[in-house]
Image (cartoon, rainbow, N blue to C red):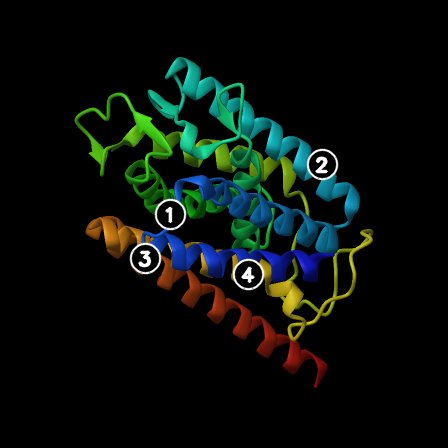
């Protein structure tokens, strides 16, 4: 199922990338944007089931989906979390004023963070929150330009019309969700899976293990291209720079782990 979901996601991404970047997406097809995020979330959940087991995947869906939905509902209705904002009809379908795709988008972002961080505990949760903010620092300004949601007041300290409180609350929310749901470690050497789970054994050559990386790269490519087209230069440059550093760090850590494992066997 993970393979089929990932292939469908990539196909949907490719079609959407062309339509959005070339600005030829017809109004009657705007629902496809929500489906794109839903497919990303579904792929993330299936990957979690493969790596950690079905029970942990269901727990992740319930907690991440529930907490993210509540935080978005509370924030958009009260203005006391994230900031004062409201979703528009362009991000339909909406449930209680919150797009149905939002909880699944949070699942996708937290799984991406898990792939990079790999660990569990407080420090891992804080790092995961930082990765979520890195993604949102580009995603949010682009979404505002596309009129998926609107900020009532950005305040004196804002980033492309997005208040600083949004990013602080994103960090806190993502860190809390990660701490509650990612209580399992993704090994640096994917030849072994966590003890006590029903996950399939996976290898570095198994491209299914890299599914979150595919989600990250496609998400980045899409929003970097859109940010470039909207002239969001500081958001594009900052996101591209720190994303490069993040990828370089993960590559180095994985390489060192692989080298250590090789030496230990010899």
Report which residue position mark 4 lands on: 11
Q: How many labels, in total? A: 4
Is 142 on the left or on the right of 67, as rendered?
left
Against 15, residue 142 (above or below) is above
Q: Where is residue 89 in the image (x, y as percent from the top left)?
A: 42, 28
* Marks 2 and 1, the one that precedes in the sequence: 2
Q: Which of marks 3 and 1 is in front?
A: 3
Q: Say what secondary structure mark 2 lies in.
A: helix
Foreground of the two, 7 or 177: 7
Q: Say what secondary structure mark 3 lies in.
A: loop
Against 210, residue 83 (above or below) is above
Foreground of the two, 3 or 257: 3
Q: Nearer the viewer, mark 3 or mark 4?
A: 3
Q: Where is residue 248 in the image (x, y as percent from the top left)?
A: 41, 67
Mark 3 surroundings within 10 Å by alpha-carbon count, few (fewer than 14), some (14 through 19), many (20 or more): few
Q: Residue at x 64, y 47 (%)?
A: 42
Q: Which residue is drawn at 39% across and 27% down?
A: 88
Quote the CA–CA distance across marks 3 and 1. 25 Å
* Marks 2 and 4, the one that precedes in the sequence: 4
Report which residue position mark 2 lands on: 59
Report which residue position mark 1 lands on: 134
Quote the CA–CA distance across marks 2 and 4. 28 Å
Q: In the displayed orientation, state which residue is furthest to the left.
A: 156
Quote the CA–CA distance across marks 2 and 1. 25 Å
Q: Of the numbered discs in the image, which one, if any, rests on residue 22?
A: 3
Mark 4 surroundings within 10 Å by alpha-carbon count, few (fewer than 14), some (14 through 19), many (20 or more): few
* Marks 3 and 2, the one that precedes in the sequence: 3
Can I make out residue 122 in this image? no
Can I make out residue 167 in this image? yes
Foreground of the two, 126 or 20: 20
Q: Say what secondary structure mark 1 lies in.
A: helix
């Amino acid at each position: 199922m993970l393979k089929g979901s990932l292939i469908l996601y990539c196909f949907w991404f490719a079609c959407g990338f062309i339509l959005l970047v070339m600005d030829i997406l017809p109004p009657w097809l705007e629902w496809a944007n929500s489906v794109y995020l839903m497919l990303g979330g579904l792929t993330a959940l299936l990957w979690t089931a493969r790596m950690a087991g079905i029970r942990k995947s269901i727990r992740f869906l319930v907690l991440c989906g529930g907490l993210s939905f509540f935080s978005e509902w509370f924030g958009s209705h009260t203005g006391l979390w994230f900031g004062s904002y409201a979703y528009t009809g362009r991000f339909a379908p909406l449930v209680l004023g919150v797009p149905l795709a939002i909880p699944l988008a949070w699942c996708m972002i937290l799984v991406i963070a898990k792939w990079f961080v790999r660990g569990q505990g407080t420090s891992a949760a804080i790092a995961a929150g930082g990765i979520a903010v890195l993604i949102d620092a580009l995603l949010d300004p682009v979404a505002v330009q596309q009129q998926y949601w609107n900020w009532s007041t950005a305040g004196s300290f804002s980033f492309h019309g997005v208040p600083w409180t949004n990013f602080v609350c994103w960090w806190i929310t993502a860190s809390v969700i990660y701490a509650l749901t990612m209580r399992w470690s993704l090994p640096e050497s994917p030849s072994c899976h966590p003890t006590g789970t029903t996950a399939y054994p996976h290898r570095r050559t198994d491209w299914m293990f890299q599914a979150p990386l595919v989600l990250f790269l496609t998400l980045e490519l899409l929003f970097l291209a859109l940010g470039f087209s909207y002239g969001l230069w500081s958001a594009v440059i900052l996101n591209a720079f720190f994303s490069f550093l993040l990828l370089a760090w993960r590559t180095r850590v994985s390489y060192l782990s692989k080298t250590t494992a090789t030496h230990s066997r010899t």
